[in-house]
Image: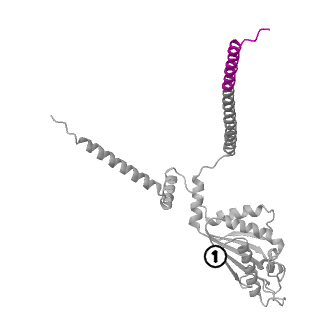
């Protein structure tokens, strides 16, 4: 019975088909889909009887800014308010940023503003930073500014200009002055008497930060799924890195010593060859002198 030599083609075709399927699978796994990842994440949590704690972009930003401002040890006159899932309000008392009737940020306020800028630049997914100026209802006494509308607008613009000069993207910034049209508290009581404390409350600058909630949430999800190292693990990694560095240094010293040893051996070998050659030369010279003496004996006296 003749052997069918074409059978190998069937096996080869099967192998190629399997390889093709394998590489298609690898390619599909390499394309990361955020939406599918979110669905799988929630289904896994549901299967194991847990849930995914959704943390809004505003809450994440609030935590970052609070941590940075707390580093200054001075939060007086600054309030951070979470307004919905994707908006954060930073409210500054008017006296914190500006002297009475002034429109330029005072020097004492700039350290805190620098920390705010640092926080804003570290937050993922910032879409808009709107600065609002607000005043009380008292009439303006300064001749440079004609109304509360101008005063509030100029103060908001001054903060925006400071943000831009400190490195915040100008495309994100906007400024608006509301004068006394948006008070937080009534400035007179039922009897018509003025309430100074409420006037102070109404004089303020508000920085409204709007964020892309989906992007910030995704960043947070990545952190949730990443392994958080304990203090002991961090110390272990540091010790391991230190030992590896010492090992590299020791290996370098060994290699250098081995190189010098080989060089010294080579020098000794060459010197031995020279010494051997020198002895041969000396021996030949001695023999030549002996023969010369025998050929030319000294004359008899």
Q: Residue furthest top?
A: 301
Q: In the rendered picture of this protein, how many numbered marks are placed on residues?
A: 1
The quadrant where residue 4 appears? top left
The quadrant where residue 198 appears? bottom right
Q: Is residue 233 magenta?
A: no
- Residue 189 in picture, x, y percent from top left: 79, 83
- Where 221 falls versus 175 (above or below)? above
> In the rendered image, which quarter contains the C terminus?
top right
Q: Is residue 279 magenta?
A: yes
Direction from residue 192 to residue 57 in the image, left or right: left
At a point 73% along the width and 71% down the height, the residue shown is: 166
At a point 76% along the width and 11% down the height, the residue shown is: 299
Reading the image, the residue beneath label 1 is 171
> Which element carries disc 1, helix, strand or loop?
helix
Direction from residue 142 to residue 31 in the image, left or right: left
- Residue 102 in picture, x, y percent from top left: 82, 82
At a point 19% along the width and 36% down the height, the residue shown is: 3
Predominant secondary structure, magenta span = helix
Q: Please, which colouring scheme is shown?
A: one colour
Segment tinted magenta in the rendering: 272-301
- The residue closer to the viewer here, 177 or 255, is 255
- The residue closer to the viewer here, 57 or 104, is 104
- Where 261 falls versus 301 (above or below)? below
- Residue 247 in picture, x, y percent from top left: 67, 37
> In the rendered image, which quarter contains the N terminus?
top left
């Amino acid at each position: 019975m003749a052997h069918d030599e074409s059978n190998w083609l069937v096996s080869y075709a099967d192998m190629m088909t399997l390889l093709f399927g394998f590489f298609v699978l690898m390619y599909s796994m390499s394309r990361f889909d955020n939406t599918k990842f979110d669905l799988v994440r929630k289904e896994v949590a549901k299967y194991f009887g847990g849930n995914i704690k959704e943390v809004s972009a505003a809450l994440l930003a609030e935590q970052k800014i609070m941590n940075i401002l707390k580093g200054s040890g001075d939060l007086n006159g600054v309030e951070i308010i979470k307004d919905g899932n994707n908006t954060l309000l930073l409210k500054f008392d008017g006296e914190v940023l500006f002297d009475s009737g002034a429109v330029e940020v005072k020097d004492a306020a700039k350290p805190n503003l620098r920390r705010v800028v640092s926080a804003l630049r570290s937050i993922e997914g910032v879409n808009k930073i709107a600065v609002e100026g607000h005043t009380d209802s008292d009439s303006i006494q300064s001749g440079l500014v004609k109304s509360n509308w101008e005063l509030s607008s100029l103060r908001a613009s001054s903060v925006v200009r400071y943000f831009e000069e400190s490195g915040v993207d100008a495309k994100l910034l906007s400024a608006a002055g509301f004068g006394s049209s948006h008070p937080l508290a009534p400035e007179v009581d039922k009897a018509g008497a003025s309430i100074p404390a409420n006037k102070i409350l109404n004089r303020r600058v508000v920085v409204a930060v709007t964020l892309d909630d989906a992007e910030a949430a995704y960043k947070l999800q990545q952190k949730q799924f990443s392994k958080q190292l304990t203090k002991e693990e961090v110390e272990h990694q540091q010790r391991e890195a230190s030992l590896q560095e010492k090992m590299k240094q020791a290996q370098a010293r060994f290699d250098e010593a081995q190189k010098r040893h080989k060089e010294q051996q080579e020098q000794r070998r060459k010197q031995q060859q020279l010494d051997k050659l020198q002895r041969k030369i000396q021996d030949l010279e001695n023999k030549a002198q002996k023969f010369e003496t025998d050929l030319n004996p000294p004359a008899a006296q």
